[in-house]
Amino acid sequence: MDREKVERLQEMVNDAKRIVFFGGAGVSTESGIPDFRSVDGLYHQKYDYPPETILSHTFFMRNTDEFYKFYYDKILLDEAQPNAAHKKLAEMEAAGKLTAVVTQNIDGLHQKAGSKNVLELHGSVLRNYCRDCGAFYTGEDMLDFKAKWKAGEAGVTPRCPKCGGLIKPDVVLYEEGLDQRTIEESVDHISKADLLIIGGTSLVVYPAAGLIDYFRGDHLVLINKSATARDSSADLVITDPIGEVLSQINV
């Protein structure tokens, strides 16, 4: 690990009054959740359909059983726990240094670590709704549905016990738009931040990646294992694992 760069990040954190963290799939890979575009990511794994096809609105509606087989196998993971990055960000918020986490992830690990102000651009596995009656189901409810299917006690697709309707995770699938209120809140926090830390994202997924264009603060920091198109505009670029980096920061 580049100690000099970590010390520089520490100085920026010390000086900052309003930190915002913008994160992607790489934040959760240290928790055992696969990302999409790395060598071992979902896009490089073999299924009957490409993951980007499975995770689309059209596929969900037309091939719901196949969607849920993939969703249970690769997205809804009950054993995943927050890693050092999630925990440090929650600590930074509790200390009054960090004002918001803006995440492209849907795994709920930021909340599990203790973060309160988490803006989920692509939704969350923690929220699920019946498409017919609107009944709400938690992530734990969905794990129960998954367990019953695995045990052969129910079909793979979860159905609302109240009306029999199809239950859909509150996640943004391909072909679906982002929640406008979440976008507006994210823009507001990013535009008011004096330090923006971007971590675990290749910054190629739009419109989410475009939100960082609203940053007008003092320092932009990029923590990602691979290069991004924004490296040249950053004040500090660190290519070490984000959990290892943030665990070295004191707040």
Image (tube, rainbow, N blue to C red):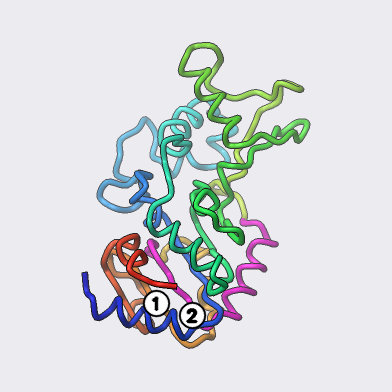
Which of 93/119 is in front? Answer: 93
Q: Label 2: how many residues lie within 10 Å, few (<14), some (14-19) or many (20+)?
A: many
- Above or below residue 69? Residue 87 is below
Label 2 or label 1, whichever comes before in sequence order: 2
Quarter the C terminus occupies: bottom left
Q: In the visual, does 88 lie left or right of 179?
A: left
Magenta residues, as a range? Answer: 178-202
Question: Label 2 is placed on what type of residue?
Answer: Leu
Please, which residue is most extreme toward the left here? 1
Which of 58/92 is in front? Answer: 92
Could you say whether the residue bearing mark 2 is in a helix, strand or loop? strand
Q: Residue at x 40, y 57 (%)?
A: 27
User: Could you tell me if the residues under marks 2 and 1 are in contact, i.e. CB atoms within 8 Å?
Assistant: yes
**Image spot of residue 183 (x, y percent):** 63, 65
Please, which residue is most extreme toward the top here? 153
**Image spot of residue 147 (x, y percent):** 50, 21
Specify the quadrant of the image occupied by residue 53. top left
**Image spot of residue 98 (x, y percent):** 54, 71
Which residue is identified by label 2? 195
- Above or below residue 131? Residue 14 is below
Which residue is identified by label 1? 221
Question: Label 1 is placed on what type of residue?
Answer: Val
Could you say whether the residue bearing mark 1 is in a helix, strand or loop? strand
Q: Residue at x 50, y 29 (%)?
A: 68
Q: Is residue 193 magenta?
A: yes
Quarter the N terminus occupies: bottom left
- Above or below residue 198? Residue 14 is below
> Exactly how many numbered labels are in the figure?
2
What distance separates the C-alpha of mark 2 from that of mark 1?
Answer: 8 Å
